[in-house]
């Protein structure tokens, strides 16, 4: 997978969103990628404000845009000072999801970076199907930033299910965090385990099935490491019995990971944010940043 060429960071200019811009700048510093900052101004509240103010709608609009442009310039200066990265800015008006999809395609961004709180992209993505329809064709991984960045990612958790999404997720992890150690996690459950219990199959038999399933998963995980050309010193493998969403959060803490890479299972990375139940759970419960693959 080629190195990052262009990173687009979406910001609502709030303090939490600054973390996303800072992480994007740190990634660009590490990978020599170009950085673009995007703010989509929401002008709908102006219709309600103008009845309380003497200014014309156009004057109010201009004030809002000038204030946003000023904050964008301050953010650019901050990133230049802290990370030595020069960012290009884009200030547009309209519907967040629509403009976001347009800018990703227009700039040919390799990665979209956004915050997890405030008037965030994530909030829009999790609200319903409108965002899905608009963004389903966006061929760009999404990095959701939760933590203030202090250093490049150092330990990355990559849950895998041995589907076609597994190898691309590993490749993306190496692309985004080239110097990090990877932790490959596979969570398994015995097929129809609940039905076996309902049918009064004894625990010894179910335990045997678990041992067999664990051994098969371990062998597949080793084969996946070889297929991904991962050296033993570059990765750590974990096989756990149980629900995938729960095990991911457990291992995030136990392995002290600062990034989780979720493989794509929908038609796009952003669709996976909307529809993937495991991804939704991880996005809500994790402490670390989340990267959704394509």
Image: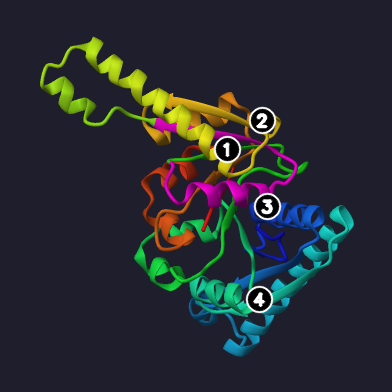
- Tell me, yes or no, whether the two marked residues, 2 and 3, touch with CB atoms within 8 Å: no
Q: Name the quadrant containing residue 214.
A: top left
Cα separation, mark 3 vs mark 4, equals 19 Å
Looking at marks 4 and 1 on the same chain, the residue that comes earlier in the sequence is marked by: 4
Identify the residue at horizontal 12%, vertical 22% (top origin).
198
Cα separation, mark 4 vs mark 1, equals 34 Å
Looking at marks 3 and 1 on the same chain, the residue that comes earlier in the sequence is marked by: 3
Looking at marks 1 and 2 on the same chain, the residue that comes earlier in the sequence is marked by: 1
Identify the residue at horizontal 65%, vertical 56% (top origin).
17
Residue position for label 2: 232
Identify the residue at horizontal 56%, vertical 59% (top origin).
141
Which disc is residue 225 wearing? 1
Residue toward you, 235 or 130: 235
Circle 1: is it few (<14), some (14-19), or many (20+) Cα within 10 Å? some
Is label 3 or label 4 in front?
3
Q: Which residues are magenta?
A: 162-187
Q: Position of residue 166 (x, y in %)?
A: 49, 46
Residue position for label 4: 107
Looking at marks 2 and 3 on the same chain, the residue that comes earlier in the sequence is marked by: 3
Cα separation, mark 2 vs mark 4, equals 37 Å
* Residue 294 sits above or below residue 254 on the image: below
SS at mark 4 in the image: helix
């Amino acid at each position: 997978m080629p190195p990052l060429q262009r990173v687009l960071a979406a910001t609502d200019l709030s303090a939490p969103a600054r973390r996303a811009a800072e992480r994007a700048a740190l990634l660009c510093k590490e990978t020599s990628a170009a950085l673009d900052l995007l703010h989509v101004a929401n002008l709908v509240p102006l219709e309600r404000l103008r009845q309380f103010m003497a200014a014309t709608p156009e004057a109010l609009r201009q004030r809002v845009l000038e204030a946003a442009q000023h904050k964008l310039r301050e953010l650019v200066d901050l990133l230049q000072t802290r990370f030595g990265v020069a960012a290009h800015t884009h200030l547009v008006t309209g519907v967040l999801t629509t403009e976001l999809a347009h800018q990703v395609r227009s700039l040919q961004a390799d990665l979209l970076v956004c915050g997890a709180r405030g008037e965030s992209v994530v909030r829009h993505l999790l609200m319903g199907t409108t965002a899905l329809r608009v963004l389903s064709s966006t061929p760009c991984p999404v990095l959701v930033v939760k933590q203030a960045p202090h250093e490049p990612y150092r330990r990355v958790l990559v849950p895998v299910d041995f589907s076609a999404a597994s190898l691309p997720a590993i490749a993306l992890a190496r692309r985004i965090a080239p110097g990090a150690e990877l932790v490959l996690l596979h969570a398994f459950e015995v097929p129809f385990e609940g039905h076996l219990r309902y049918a009064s199959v004894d625990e010894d038999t179910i335990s045997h099935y678990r041992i067999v399933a664990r051994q098969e998963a371990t062998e597949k995980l080793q084969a996946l490491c070889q297929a991904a050309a991962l050296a033993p010193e570059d990765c750590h493998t974990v096989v756990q019995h149980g629900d995938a969403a729960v095990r991911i959060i457990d291992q995030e803490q136990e392995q002290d990971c600062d990034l989780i890479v979720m493989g794509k299972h929908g038609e796009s990375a952003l669709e996976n944010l909307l529809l993937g139940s495991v991804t939704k759970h991880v996005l809500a419960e994790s402490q670390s940043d989340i990267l959704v693959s394509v």
